[in-house]
Amino acid sequence: MEPNLFIYNTLNRRKEKFEPISPPFVGMYVCGPTVYGDAHLGHARPAIVFDMVYRYLLHLGYKVRYVRNITDVGHLEGDADEGEDKIGKKAKLDNIEPMEVVQFYTNQYHAAMDKLNVLRPSIEPHASGHIIEQIEMIRKILDAGFAYEKNGSVYFDIEKYNSQHKYGVLSGRNIDELLAYTRELEGQEEKKNNFDFSLWKKADPEHLMHWPSPWSEGYPGWHLECSTMGTKYLGDQFDIHGGGLDLQFPHHECEIAQSVAANKKMPVKYWLHNNMITLNGQKMGKSLGNAISLDDFFKGNHKLLEQAYSPIAIRFFMLQAHYRSPLDFSNEALQAAEKGLEKLFTSLNTLNKLTASNKSTSDIPGLRDKCYEAMNDDFNSPILIAHLFEGVRIINSINDIKETITAADLSLLKQLMQEFVFDILGLKEEESESSNELVDALMETIINIRQKARENKDWDTSDLIRDNLSKIDIKIRDTKDGAVWDIE
Amino acid sequence: MEPNLFIYNTLNRRKEKFEPISPPFVGMYVCGPTVYGDAHLGHARPAIVFDMVYRYLLHLGYKVRYVRNITDVGHLEGDADEGEDKIGKKAKLDNIEPMEVVQFYTNQYHAAMDKLNVLRPSIEPHASGHIIEQIEMIRKILDAGFAYEKNGSVYFDIEKYNSQHKYGVLSGRNIDELLAYTRELEGQEEKKNNFDFSLWKKADPEHLMHWPSPWSEGYPGWHLECSTMGTKYLGDQFDIHGGGLDLQFPHHECEIAQSVAANKKMPVKYWLHNNMITLNGQKMGKSLGNAISLDDFFKGNHKLLEQAYSPIAIRFFMLQAHYRSPLDFSNEALQAAEKGLEKLFTSLNTLNKLTASNKSTSDIPGLRDKCYEAMNDDFNSPILIAHLFEGVRIINSINDIKETITAADLSLLKQLMQEFVFDILGLKEEESESSNELVDALMETIINIRQKARENKDWDTSDLIRDNLSKIDIKIRDTKDGAVWDIE
């Protein structure tokens, strides 16, 4: 099948046919977390969205190298190179090594992503592990004349860059606007222009993470790592760059400027941005008291949550919205998603029990085409899910003997549900965590029946129980405290 | 409690009282895997052994910073700087980026270690992420006069080092022996002496991973990373360095030489080495056809395995031997460990049901002291386990009303079993992966009984079943295909 995938390219503000630079290979880079705090919903959305993109590209037969970074240095509190390093600050607060902070929250992030059934990327590079590469890239930008050094720090010269290339191609902003936006900041007097950004910062004496460089003992600017690691692992020009809409400006804009300055090429063919999440209609944030960690969601541990929500219910909920739409989390919406998911899985169990007839009353090949059309239309997962629920309706109608299906269509229906539900949307049935308790409760029931049968000298029933249980290696023993059971 | 821990220090070939350099802080470095192949038993032993050490130090109240590295560059096929980079070779074979190899096997290693209940270290640094630091250390060694550059590569000068410091303090080898041991190797003519080892290697044109350095575009020598990352995160002198006995020479010997040369200090106070594993009495190796991956053990997927072995059974088996003893894996021995583990957990369940009396017939405080004595005697886990089985005997005797225990002793016994079994040995009861299947089988049994009761018009039994199941929200429905059940 010739893929006919269209992707909305933020760079050109329109849907474009996806034509990778060197098919069947696809290079995809997505901005990962800055690991200084609990993994939260804001981490989950890009991870799930681009996991779906990754899964769909794999499904279409592309050989995808998916790079998602870990930011462990250089991300300062303020966007304009001011404030402390986020990880360094947390390390000082907790009185530990910055890399202990990084390890702890990276482990936590991975555990949460695993629960959300997000596939691990092909490469997960750390910013702190690519200091040499970042220094090399700064050298290239300096050599090209688009950066300047001041007191051991190196800044990107946006005005100079803009005179030869256009700064703002991704976000549509221009320098005049930028000047209006930019606040006067303390400690920025080294910059020629307020909106220049740092490539290398000389470390203050209290700064914990620093490395030697030709300019100073210091650390890289935040925007630099993604340009460096993206091009290192995917080449000077690669296919897809993803991230949250909040990263479009300045982060991704600066990435483009850095790469063009250093390599004289636009680095990325398709820029994808997922929209933001709100909670009960409000922006999320620590200061707003509604920053709920993913673990809190999974456990129902927050005053705003009426119950625990399973990772797969959260995943399903996110995919019910198109990735470019904003998404509001609320208890009602999540509970509705939970019910929908249950309905979907119930019908998949029914699907396995359906029997074929001579005739199909529904158009299964047509349904499959619609599913592909949805995904090919800029990964339109809500439309895909609507079609899958048309599948659910068909399954239930066949089961209720209101409709019929041929053997060939039944096989096709099973395949399409399998591929779209599990492989592409990445949903899965969750193991009941309480099945051990259930086993205990069922054995108690059986022991009660056995007890009553023995009182009534109903040896047939007690023999039946013994024989059935022995088949599954369970033995009941009578003790002074009553009957107990063991798995042999 | 003043800890009274004695550790066998390979450096001095005797047990020494453990006195950390800056109590309550303890710095511990353990050599981690080279991530180019499946995680196997040889990875599991050091991980489990030093996990037990880590857990015991934490239990004693130390604040431990535990660093375990990932080797992702510089580990060549041959010990004497010859052959291809192990990861680069695998990348060429699979036609992928070296860092994709690293990511894949690191993920696999983590998954296996999680199953073995091995705690994540505080920091898990990658060799490739510390090239600058390694270059800095080479500079220091060159400045001190203990290394020389030749054609873009830098070698450690063992003869020069040995003239001022003793080379061989850890392994007890001396240079004359070394000369006898060392083969003549092709491509080693740059070295002054055959047994000199590389700190930096100029990359051949086909070498995939390389970085700029003052000497050449190249890559660091294998021994260097541990010296660099150990001292970066734990200081020039730290408390514990662990690893497998196979790393004692040359790897750890070279680490000492590098650190002494660069920092003029012995880097490590206590060197610990775990002994090796054999399989049915044979050394393990890919060429011997008995290199069984951990996943194969967990699934029973190998012709040498009679069954699957659970991760915790493997862990328990490893801890039944002292870490400095060799350990032979066989089906018989693993099955015996499995039975022992089951007996231990059965008794822990019994323990929770015991009732107290006026008098204790066993010396519980004495038992606790013996457990600590065992662990304080160089982490003697087999002796500890023998004492825990004395606990099992006491529990079962009390349960059989052959012995009695006071409330205070019962509480103490519970605490000591909890602490030593779970916290220190890191054992845990495994969730039965088959509990969902078990639920299905038990429900089938119940439905059979119900069917028979209804045939016999035994409404009491069928009501009993209905009432018992409704308590746990299970409903049985009769359909044309027989009875089916649902959890409501």
Image: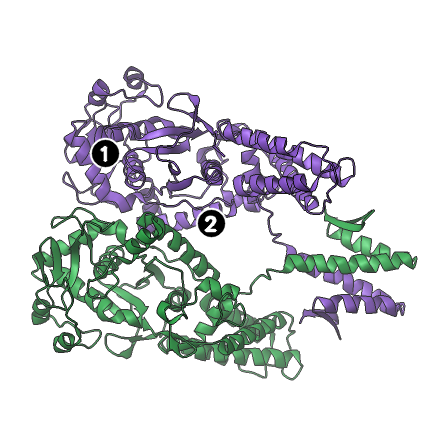
Chain colours: A green, B purple
Nearer to me, A309 or A339: A309
Q: Position of residue A93 (x, y in %)?
A: 33, 53
User: To which chain does the residue with label 2 belong?
Assistant: B
Amino acid under disc 1:
Leu
Q: Is residue B122 above or below residue B249?
A: below
Amino acid under disc 2:
Ala
Is B361 situated left or right of A177 in this image?
Answer: right
Is there one chain holding both mark 2 and mark 1?
A: yes
* Disc 2 secondary structure class: helix
In 3D space, how far apart are the residues under numbered discs 2 and 1 (Cα atoms)?
A: 32 Å
* Disc 1 secondary structure class: strand
For the question of whether residue B13 can be seen, the reply is: yes
Q: Position of residue B126 (x, y in %)?
A: 32, 45
Is A9 situated left or right of A396 in this image?
Answer: left
Residue B177, by quadrant, is top left
For the question of whether residue A461 can be seen, the reply is: no
Q: Residue furthest right?
A: A457
- In the rendered image, which residue does mark 2 sit on? B111
Sequence-first disc among 2 and 1: 2
| Label 1 CA crowd tier, 10 Å (few <14, some 14–19, many 20+) | many
Tag 2 near tag 1, CB within 8 Å: no
Residue A172, by quadrant, is bottom left
Is A439 situated left or right of A297 in this image?
Answer: right
Is A260 situated left or right of B126 in this image?
Answer: left
Residue A165, by quadrant, is bottom left
Q: Position of residue B384 (x, y in %)?
A: 58, 32
| Label 2 CA crowd tier, 10 Å (few <14, some 14–19, many 20+) | some
- In the rendered image, which residue does mark 1 sit on? B199
Q: Position of residue A1 (x, y in %)?
A: 40, 71
Q: Is residue A74 above or below residue A168?
A: above
Nearer to me, A124 or B412: B412
User: To which chain does the residue with label 1 belong?
Assistant: B
